Every structure is written in C-alpha cells, then in structure tokens.
Image (cartoon, helix red, strand yellow):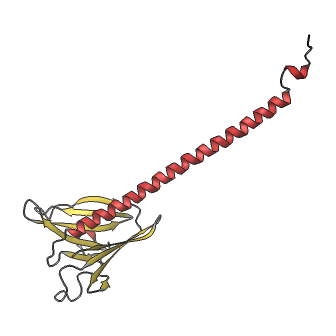
Amino acid sequence: MKTTTAAQRGLTLIEVMVALAVFAVLGMLTWKATSQLADARQHVGAEFERWRAISSAAHRIGNELQQIVPAAGALRLDTDGTSGSTSGMTGVLDFTMPAGQDGLPARARFLLIGRRLEWWLWDGSNPTAAPERLTLLDEVDAVRWRFLHEGRWYDNWPLQDEAAAPLLPAAVTLELDLPDAGTLQRTYALR
C-alpha cells in the first residue's frame, strides 16, 4: 500500500495564486487587443464613410457640370457675393441645366455655406420659387473653381472679354480644402 503525502494531494496556495495571476494577465491582454480591434474597425469605418461621401459629392458635381447648357451666361462664378440671395458668400458657381419636361431650363448652384457644400436647384417652371437645397458634403474649409480656356487656367468665368470667350470653358477644376484629407482637386472636361 502506498502512502500519500500532502505534496501529492493537490496544489499549494502559492501555485493557485500564480495560476490565477497568469490567467488574469492573459485575460487583460485579450480584452485590450479586442478593444483596440473594435476601435480600429470603427475608425476605418468612419474613414470609409467620409471618403465615400467625398467621392459621391465629386461624382455628383461632375454629372451636373456635364449637363450645362452651352448658352450665354450658362456658367458664372460669383466671387463678390452679388449672386442673388447669397450675399456675402464667395465662390458661388451658377449654371443652367437642360430644359425639363416643361421645356424651361433649370438653374443650379454650388456654394459653400459655413463648412457645408450645398447644391441648390431651381425649378425651370418657377424660377422665383425658393430653391431645393441639397447637402453635398460637410466639413469643407474652402471651395475654389478654376476654368480652362485655350490652354490657360482662369480664376473667373465668364472672362472679362465675354464677346471673345466661348460660352463654356474647356474644363472646370474644383478644389476642396478638407480638414481631414487636405486639398483635393478634381478636373471635369466640359467639351
């Protein structure tokens, strides 16, 4: 018959405490890693949504600029705030879009209000009515427009000598100053 001693019957109190400490450290490391992974996923998701919003706004602007009606006054940059109800706002791009079902051309405008880039649309059948206002992009510090004509870029359109200038520039460049992405530039060919 075999006799058992106290050392053979189980773990000592110190061994149990060391094992608990090891499990506690492993648990904390696992929790910390999981927490950081969740934070990173949330950050990446927010970044993805922001870039999707930027891309969507740039795409919408390009689509609308492609539809400008080539006529006198169809595209105008208001740099001094004299464009109707937007007094005090600079860099307002006004343009005329094709006639709708009513046969009348519609007016549209891109402008920065505060830090929000907006797209305003006027119904061609009622040009005196308030425009429909759509937000294209939030958190925009500045918007700049440039116009390509005969290989040179201009900061204003129409040009000073409107009689010699074409109805539309060859291209329009949009620059957006974004606090989280820097300055983004997009060029749209108009003809």
Figure check: 6 above or below 27: above
Figure check: 7 above or below 30: above
Q: Residue 87: where, in percent of width, then height?
A: 28, 72
In the figure, residue 80 lies in which quadrant?
Answer: bottom left
Q: Residue 118: where, in percent of width, then height?
A: 30, 63
Task: Please tell me which residue is depicted at 8% across the width and 59% down the height of the picture.
Answer: 101
Figure check: 40 above or below 126: above
- Residue 183 is left or right of residue 63, and the answer is right
- Residue 4 is left or right of residue 77, and the answer is right
Task: Please tell me which residue is depicted at 38% across the width and 62% down the height of the picture.
Answer: 54
Question: Camera-side residue: 20 or 100?
Answer: 20
In the figure, residue 127 lies in which quadrant?
Answer: bottom left
Question: Camera-side residue: 94 or 48?
Answer: 48
- Residue 104 is left or right of residue 3, and the answer is left
Question: Camera-side residue: 115 or 18?
Answer: 18
Q: Residue 64: where, in percent of width, then height?
A: 23, 66
